[in-house]
Image (cartoon, rainbow, N blue to C red):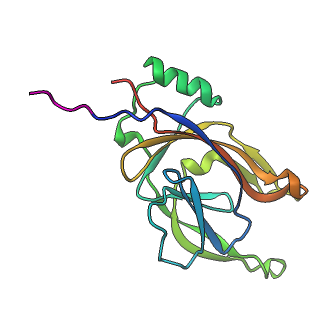
Amino acid sequence: MTIPRKKVVPTSLYHFENVKATSYTDWVYVNLHQKDTVTLGYQDVNYPAGWDFAIHRYDVKTNGGGAIETAYDDIAKFLSDVESGSFPQPLASSYAGDVQDSIIVDLSHMMAGKVVYAHTSLNTELGKWLNLDLSTMPPVYTSSGKVYLLMMKDETVAAIKFTGYSNPQLYNMKGYISFDYLYPINFVK
């Protein structure tokens, strides 16, 4: 009796360009499997089916998954090392899950010293992709340039490299997120 082998889907590189995450009142739910997004208000609990992670401005959360920041800044080099076996599959326990935190949802009274927050879950590991320094005006945005691993709810893994946080076609308006991702990651066993 032969045991059927699980079909290995080759890893492919995909790209999302200028995902509009400009609103403080919305989450953009990203489905890496279907390569699409759905935008919903932060209070909406009717989440779209199959989302993998969500973006609120620069904040991120996962759909029951976790993340790891790698030392890689080159997604092609990361894939090469995975395929050669020199980057082995991390243990599931190595992935940082979401934690309870808060997001800004209303800045309309900021000049009066009032900012409104909403409680939510966030993935602080994946959230390292962008540092926003508000100690100066205008704020200073610094991308980590790192490749992140995202273990999804179905236990498959994607590698994500965020490549932009503003839209060059709209005078570099902030809140437009671009990223490359590899999926699925087939670690050498």
Residue 82 to residue 8: above or below:
above
Residue at 38 percent of width and 53 percent of height: 153
Q: Quadrant of the C terminus?
A: top left
Residue 156 to residue 3: above or below:
below
Residue 86 shows in this picture = no
Residue 33 to residue 92: above or below:
below
| Residue 30 found in image quarter | bottom right
- Is 117 in front, or is 189? 189
Drawn side of residue 120 relative to residue 155, left or right: right
Instruction: Tell me the magenta residue range.
Output: 1-5
* Place of residue 70 in the rendered image (x, y in percent of width and height, measured from the top left): 55, 33
* Place of residue 158 in the rendered image (x, y in percent of width and height, measured from the top left): 49, 41
Residue reaching furthest left? Answer: 1
- Magenta segment: does it hold 65? no
* Place of residue 142 in the rendered image (x, y in percent of width and height, measured from the top left): 76, 45
* Place of residue 12 in the rendered image (x, y in percent of width and height, measured from the top left): 54, 35
Q: In which quarter of the image is the N terminus?
A: top left
Residue reaching furthest right? Answer: 171
| Residue 109 found in image quarter | bottom right
Residue at 71 percent of width and 53 percent of height: 177
Residue reaching furthest front? Answer: 1
Drawn side of residue 143 relative to residue 169, left or right: left
Residue 129 shows in this picture = yes
Provide the major secondary structure of the magenta segment.
loop
